[in-house]
Image: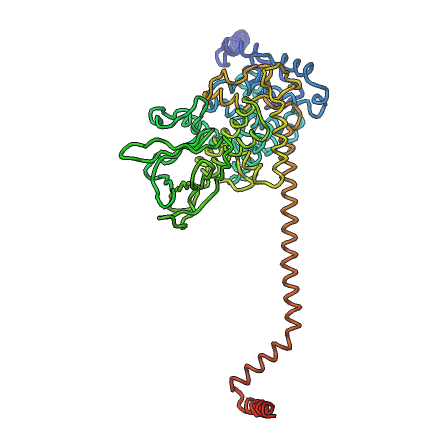
Amino acid sequence: MEGVWENFMRNNQDTFKSLFQRKKSSNDEDSLASAPTPIPQLSSLANSVVFRCSKILKIPTEELQHRFDIELPESVKQLFTYARNFLEFCSYQALHNVTRNPDYLSDTDFRRLTYDMMLAWEAPCVEFERGTKETSPNNDEVEDDEDGALFYSSPISMAVQVDDKKTVGREAFGRIAPACAVVADIITVHNLFDALTSSAGPRLHFIIYDKYLRSLDKVINAAKNTLAPSLTNLPLSDVEIIIDIEGGVPTQPVLQHVGISAWPGRLTLTNFALYFEALGVGVYDKAVRYDLATDLKQVIKPELTGPLGARLFDKAVMYKSTTVTEPVYFEFPEFKGNFRRNFWLDISLEILHAHRFARKHNFKETQQSEVVARAILGIFRYRALREAFQFFSSQYKTLLSFNLAESIPGGDAILETLANRMAHLNVDNSPGTVKHPPTSSPFSLLALSQLGFIPQKNAILDGETLMVGDFCVGETHPLEIAVKKTISDTGRAEAAQATVNQVKVEGIETNLAVMKELMLPFIQLATCLVLLFSWKEPFKSTVFLMLTSFAIIR
């Protein structure tokens, strides 16, 4: 009987396996057939990012690698930099493609992809991955029962799930984030990173990055959805963009002081001017325009205001120009602090500085638009951080490019480098290549156009020219070099000044000690006279009085 049972089990072994083993679906088989071959030089996460980029570009990974090998110079294809530069090559092109969609910031896949790009940039090759595994032996590894690593089983599993413990460093963020003009600016990207990591440590967590992008998306949508009927009093031109509005909420009014009079109303900032609409009986009066674009010797600074012209509260912004007979003050009342005032002071100065920079270098229309677009995107980022994290910038940690260059010692070097980039701006839509664009592209202007703020006919949309935006694979951006040098020089200057101040303090203390020693006899004499005059020792006081009287009589 046992022999018959054994023969039955042996003959039907395949049938039993088919009953209890997982049967692969046709979709799984198609996935296996279409799964790309991982690039040996890349880590698993880098392979995942490259594969996702190839899906976005609709180009096989092998073709992307072939293009990288034949189109880019040998300097970026060295053994130790090949993986990272190839990752940049794929990432920049994919980001340029993705950002053509006006709603990409609201896409969870975009936020995860850009974060994974930063993680992969820090560990682009297999050697980095091996080092990570050696230093982190407790990390769980997911393997497939049949084919080894789950990463290779299908394109879906190739999208590596990033561990919550993984974070992004400063250099990786500075290399990937500015490739999307809306997310970061090359001039202030490190200040942005410091702001995002100020409460969570020296490295960036995905949850913070995700919250920032969500807030940025909310700010941009609010700016785009500003309703025209509520702004009929504003004499806006066709190219004016409303950046922010304050005073529309009764609990947060804006008061305009002219002379000793004050009136509540609504303040609007555009890319060309400030507009104030005084509040009438249920409606706003005709808007008064305060120009920021034309050279009118404008002065914008913080100021004190109060009732009847009294200087009591540090909550106002002063505007003065040759077109107004006397300075105008915009007060932002709040119970605690002057955060509203500081925000509006910063963003108003940013637009003013951007126009001054454009006038100084006699830029053409496209160049001027690019400069102002950079300022507008910086304001959106500043507002997003302010609303999401209660962030308020300091002098050297501002997120506004032109304010930073104007406030930091040696900021002229940053503006000069930016002017050189603007001078080579592609204003005639001449062709360029990924390898080395002969001209830089209107990166910020294109971003505003893709978001729907300006007509796309006013922006250059040539795909070849803008393949990697204003970035070259494997090269450091000139603006990044200028910013790092300026900040480094500023740090050394501040350290030197602190040393000088310390020496001065120590010198004062030393001089005081010397003077005290020299004055010691006089101090002791004065102490003795006080004792005699107090008559605490009558005998000594009497003798002193008699001797003094005798000296006077003689």
> Residue at point 49% right, 10% down?
25
Q: Can residue 488 be seen in this view?
A: yes
How far across and how far down the image is residue 432, in percent? 63, 16
Q: In which quarter of the image is the C terminus?
A: bottom right
Q: Which of 359 and 506 is in front in this view?
A: 359
How far across and how far down the image is residue 414, in percent? 62, 34
**206 left or right of 324 in image:** right
> Residue at point 34% right, 35% down?
278
Q: Which of 81 and 146 is in front in this view?
A: 81
Q: Which of 493 and 307 is in front in this view?
A: 307
How far across and how far down the image is residue 371, in percent? 54, 27
Q: Which residue lies furthest to the left in this view?
A: 281
Q: In this view, does 335 lie above or below 168?
A: below
**277 left or right of 474 in image:** left
Q: Which residue lies furthest to the top in this view?
A: 11
Q: In this view, does 166 lie above or below 505?
A: above
> Residue at point 66% right, 26% down?
475
Q: Nearer the viewer, residue 127 or 311?
A: 311
Which quadrant holds residue 155? Answer: top right
Q: Can residue 149 be seen in this view?
A: no
Q: How is the image coloured?
A: rainbow
Q: In this view, does 273 lie above or below 147?
A: below
How many discs appear?
0
